[in-house]
């Protein structure tokens, strides 16, 4: 296993994480030239995902914008093309709340490309304080999208990522990256148990557990899941050229706030919300910077700073149990 080659990260205090100092790494100024690299960004039509795609295209990457709404994705792509003067961005239909759609998206991508240098698992949903709907397969929507959908997409694309890392197509080995956009909610609002397994059952079997947790804790649980899966990806594939990093992008104004109670959303915006131009920094740092290649298995916080994740996120038994749970759920899809 190849893990971070750096000295252990130091704990960033809660205050500093919520109200970060000015960034020392900036976008697009510090993004290297990405000519020849292919990126896939989930949820790339809005918010952090949209600006991530824009900055990558600006620096000459070929980008696949994956989203469930083709209409909104096309609008985003037109906007990116007009603002950058470049056209190396393409739409990929993907609904992470439907495992069948996830497989179709992966197959479509693999029919178009032989390589993938960076996968950015960015798409997200937030239902707070109430619980959200279920996925097409009957799972909690937040866990289904953030954890299960992204896990399945990642594993379907893993052969392509490994082929790229080995240089089977290009003739030159390279490190590839999997970037998972999590949240400080993985620590702040996750259940005290870390993962409440009853809430992950299909259909109405999980309804009571989900109601008891509320949407806020379900969100935190799902974001914890993203950190755990990222860490396990680093452990399993680090010695094969994969660099997996999870991150908290910072408190950023985005469409995630649309499901919050209006009063709560207003308070959140007033006390700890920053523009997307700042929120995109940590994702782009993890996805493009030379320094981040040394950070396999790590967790970053705003703005592009190494951070120690929650105790649950560092639990190897919980990490492995969640991985096996995800493996079992995607069988047959």
Image: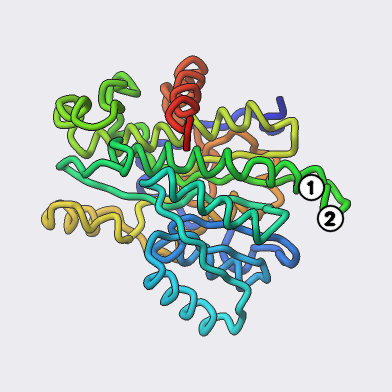
Q: Residue at x 42, y 66 (%)?
A: 45
Q: Residue at x 23, y 38 (%)?
A: 216
Residue on which disc 1 sits: 174
Residue 88 location, quadrant: bottom right
Which numbered disc, 1 or 2, marks the residue closer to the eye?
2
Q: Quadrant of the N terminus?
A: top right
Find the distance from the CA under tag 1 to the CA under tag 2: 10 Å
Residue 29 location, quadrant: bottom right
Which disc number belongs to residue 170? 2
Q: Is residue 135 left or right of residue 167?
A: left
**Can you say whether 117 is above or below 44 in the image?**
above
x then y, percent, for residue 76: 44, 73
Most foreground residue, 302 or 173: 173
x then y, percent, for residue 30: 64, 63
Per the image, label 1 sits on a secondary structure element best described as: loop
Most foreground residue, 235 or 95: 95
x then y, percent, for residue 3: 67, 29
């Amino acid at each position: 296993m190849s893990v971070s080659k750096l000295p252990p990260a130091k704990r960033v205090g809660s205050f500093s994480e919520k109200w970060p100092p000015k960034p020392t790494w900036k976008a697009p100024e510090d993004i290297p030239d990405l000519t020849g690299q292919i990126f896939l960004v989930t949820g790339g039509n809005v918010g952090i995902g949209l600006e991530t795609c824009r900055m990558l295209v600006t620096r000459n990457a070929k980008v696949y914008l994956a989203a469930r709404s083709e209409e909104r994705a096309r609008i985003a792509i037109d906007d990116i093309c007009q603002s950058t003067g470049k056209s190396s961005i393409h739409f990929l239909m993907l609904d992470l709340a439907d495992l069948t759609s996830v497989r179709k998206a992966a197959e479509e991508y693999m029919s178009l490309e032989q390589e993938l240098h960076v996968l950015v698992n960015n798409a997200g949903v937030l239902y707070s304080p109430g619980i959200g709907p279920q996925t097409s397969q009957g799972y909690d929507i937040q866990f289904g999208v953030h954890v299960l959908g992204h896990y399945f997409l990642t594993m379907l694309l893993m052969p392509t990522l490994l082929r790229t890392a080995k240089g089977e197509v290009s003739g030159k080995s390279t490190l590839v990256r999997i970037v998972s956009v999590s949240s400080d909610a993985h620590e702040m609002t996750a259940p005290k148990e870390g993962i409440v397994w009853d809430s992950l059952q299909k259909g109405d079997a999980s309804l009571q557990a989900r109601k008891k947790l509320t949407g806020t804790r379900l969100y935190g649980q799902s974001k914890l899941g993203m950190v755990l899966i990222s860490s396990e990806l680093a452990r399993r594939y680090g010695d094969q050229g994969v660099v997996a990093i999870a991150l908290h992008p910072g408190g950023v104004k985005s469409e995630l706030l649309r499901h919050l109670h209006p009063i709560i959303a207003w308070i959140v915006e007033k006390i700890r919300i920053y523009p997307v131009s700042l929120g995109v920094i940590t994702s782009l740092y993890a996805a493009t910077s030379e320094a981040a290649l040394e950070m396999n298995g790590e967790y970053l916080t705003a703005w592009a700073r190494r951070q120690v994740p929650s105790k649950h996120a560092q639990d190897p038994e919980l990490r492995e149990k969640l991985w096996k749970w995800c493996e079992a759920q995607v069988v047959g899809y």
